[in-house]
Amino acid sequence: MNFELFVALRYLLALRKQAFISLISLFAVAGVSLGVASLIVVIGVMNGFTHDLREKILGVNADVIVGSFEGPFADYRELAAKVAATPGVVGVTPFVYTEVMASGEKGVKGLVLRGIDPASAGGVLSIGKDMTLGKLEDLGAPGDLPGVIVGSELAQALGLHLGAMVNLLSPAGKKTAAGFSPKIVPFRVAGVFRTGMYEYDSSLGYVTIAAAQDLLGFKNDLASGLEIRLADVDDAQDVAKLLRDKIGKFPLYVRSWMDMNANLFAALKLEKTAMFIILVMIVLVGSFSIVTTLVMLVLRKTKDIAVLMSMGAREKSIRTIFMLQGTIIGAVGTVLGFLLGVPASLLLKKYQFIELPPGVYPVDYLPVRLEAVDLLSIGLAAFLLCFVATIYPARKAAALKPAEALRYE
């Protein structure tokens, strides 16, 4: 143990005999630890919220979508074969998109209806994993009525259950002499899914492509587009560029999940940054307490500093002693903050005891996700603030003149 660290530790241990300075030191440690713990929990929640939201959005929607500006097109099977051969693509499925009215025992509700291919949709969408009643394969099972899979919130709102009948009303009806007549087709509930996102669970339904084409009155085998799953979702922009070069001539277009949700995730990133800056202020308050502690300690130890300097201690050593003291206080506060914040985050993640009201937030519980980069950034930010707080008191201590300090002793 070197000289500066030895003296710094002796001064810290002696603080218990100086009640007022000791109390300020405790406030400094508490301020830093609370700030660090708050940062860990809040940033963990922001990470969890962003990650869960992305997973749920990419579960219901594809990583990349290929569509046409001119509406449904016919050669989607040949196009799907070209897309499947693109590097980075692990799954391709066609879809038909429309909006209809669903009528059940308890009322009528608007519904976003998607026609899918049950054989290939499971490799692209999470619908197969989200099923709570029935199976995805049951969607295309033969029967008197075509099958439909609905969200759990929608099933509850309309009083639907497995095997129940629901009428779907499409605006793409027939034009008669009496005016426009919408088309109504009865469907059998083949399954119920739950994603955890109220927006999807309350207004989304799936049928087979053939059933959707019949409901919309398509005379030919048409699809609204292709949904594509990638090996790595972070490569969406690069794969989308490859697809544009390969098949992206007008009227076809290619959009990645980043393009379609850019504003949402940019807002979440901005909110995370703002919360980080705000909560760092708590650590800053704790660092101000470190300044107060060290300034008062310098005033109390003026004689000791003068004696050390008269015995040969250099200004650098005196400065190092007080910088080590403040740094140790900050380090203790940071470690205590981690010991408080990390277990709290893990408990919140495991037990999910904070529920969110459905319909207000896109998830139904408070998610938490701890990332090593964020934990490292929080630790470094807290430690740096505490270190910067030691500079002024340490310089004041090193600027003392031994002769003047001992003149009246």
Image (cartoon, rainbow, N blue to C red):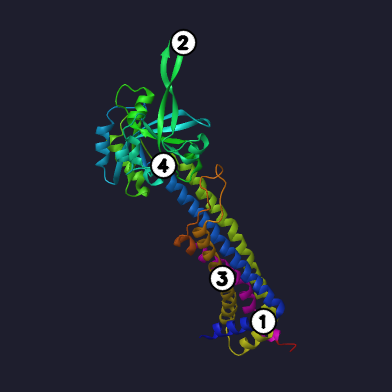
What residue is disc 1 on? 16
Magenta region, residue range: 377-405
Residue 258 in percent (x, y) is at 41, 43
Image quadrant where one finds the C terminus: bottom right
Is residue 234 left or right of 324 when viewed as pictured? left
Q: Label 2: state its secondary structure.
A: loop
Q: Label 3: state its secondary structure.
A: helix
Q: Report the disc number at residue 178.
A: 2
* Crowding at mark 2 (Cα within 10 Å: few <14, some 14-19, many 20+): few
| Residue contact at pointers 3 and 4, CB within 8 angstroms | no
Residue 143 in percent (x, y) is at 33, 31
* Crowding at mark 4 (Cα within 10 Å: few <14, some 14-19, many 20+): some
- Residue for point 32% across, 29% down: 210
Closer-to-camera residue (107/202): 107
Tell me which label, 3 or 1, sits earlier in the chain. 1
Tag 4: residue type? Answer: Val
